[in-house]
Image (spheres, helix red, strand yellow):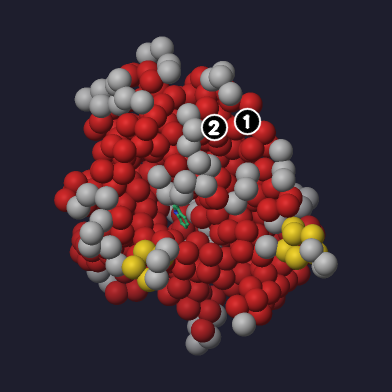
Amino acid sequence: MASFNTSNRGTFGSRFGFIAAAAGSAIGLGNIWRFPYVTGENGGGAFLLIYLFFILVIGIPVMLSELVIGRKTLQNPFGAFKTLKPNQPWFLIGVMGILAAFFILAFYGAVGGWTMEYLFQSVQNGFAGKTPEQLGESWDNFQSGTWRPVMWQLIFMIVTMYIVLSGVEKGIEKYARILMPLLLVIIIIISIRSITLPGAGKGLAFLFKPDFSKIFARGETLTVNYKIILEALGQAFFSLSIGMGTLITYGSYMKKSSKLGSSALIVSLTDTFIAILAGVAIFPAVFAFGIAPGEGQDLVFKALPNIFLQMKGGYIFALLFFMLLTVAALTSSISVLEVVVATFIEQFKLSRKKATLIAGSLISVLGVLCVLSWSDYAIKFGEELHFFGLLEIIATKFFLPLGGLAIVAFLGWFHKKNSTLEELSNNGTIRVWFFKIYLFIIRYLAPIAISALFVKIIIDLF
Ligand code: TRP
């Protein structure tokens, strides 16, 4: 097993290995569960456009910045900032990242558990013969239960911990490189079936025809719904796995000869392609089977089984799909846990085993509170907001964008330009044609855009 002190840390075996692992981290429930549901809640096409804008203009530069910091320092996020700026509070980015990891994995584990339940149901052919209404009811019964969703969440967390225990090359890389391409193929097949359903056109129009009235309201003056814009930014960060140091950590396992620019581009574009594909698979079915696009966190679980029932060989496709989705969720969840574990190992000198057990158990407990959000034991804050939703909002809308803001501001303003260029160009061996644009984004565009959004939202609160 790879050991993880700074002199002899694990590394990815190959360039493809890194890309597969980073794409494995990025592609997960964020694409297939979260992207469709937040797009559905926020009006469809217009939201998609803003999301794409954030991926291209802010997301990719943030990802690149994380890789630069990780590969330069060969450290976890906390240690990286301690090394780059000792005696300055930049390490707090690492602290916020740990907190974000706890919150994200807590609710992620809940959804990972739901996925496993649906894998189990597909094995048993549990969707067969049910109408869309019956499928919806059986979902609601499952989700609002207690022991069953908790059991699956715990199983999901145990598997996540087991993989993280076995280290980078043997654990993370091995699973990612075989199964991710297969997932892509299955989603393409499902999308094809979905767009050929009767009434599918409405779903495609919802996803691709931007209706800006959701975002800009023309009254006497033009008002903008900044909450939707923040939601798009948060989803872009969540889907790319950026803003909490996951890619600092993965960057620290990268070979010095790997190209950071093209790696970030490939990972981001693949991730975005899969999110859109998930939308293409889900929205036609949502409209064809009379499900509300703003249904919320259960949207895909209610929509997808209907498609499988309409497919030749649906039993096999459902089985394969939920199996691969479980794996995709695991290659993401391990990347969240890995940030905490790498930090605990390097900062507190714990063994990998101890670090994994401690971090994993604490997060699992927090996760149980998330799972119970639909049950009789739900912790609620007012009518609408439950514990799951609260952690999801804090992490995706605040911690990730603020972490991203701090990371780009750091590289843009508090780190030598030449040192960044050195890392991006692998010590001058490759040409970094995009350096000027990149610098403009991390110095001005991204920091100003993100801060302006927060300032506006804070002003609106009062
Ligand atoms: N991006 C993953 C997904 O789409 C989730 C994830 C993994 C993540 N690591 C992360 C999100 C780090 C934010 C930060 O499912």
Q: Residue furthest bottom?
A: 87
In x, y percent, where is residue 393? Answer: 47, 64
Question: Is residue 230 something that shows in the picture?
Answer: yes
Q: Position of residue 91 (x, y in %)?
A: 48, 77
In the image, 336 versus 450, the foreground residue is 450
Question: Mark 2 and mark 1 in contact (Cβ < 8 Å)?
Answer: yes
Q: Is 375 left, or right, of 386 in this rendering?
A: left
Q: Quadrant of the C terminus?
A: bottom right
Measuring 43% from the left and 16% from the top, which residue is drawn there? 311
Q: Quadrant of residue 374?
A: bottom left
- Mark 1 belongs to which amino acid? Lys
Label 2 near ligand 1 (CB < 8 Å): no
Number of on-image labels: 2
Label 2: few (<14), some (14–19) or many (≥20) C-alpha neighbours in 10 Å: many
Where is residue 141, by image quadrant? top left
How far apart are labels 1 and 2 at the CA level? 6 Å
Q: Secondary structure at mark 2?
A: helix
**Which label number is shown at residue 202?**
1
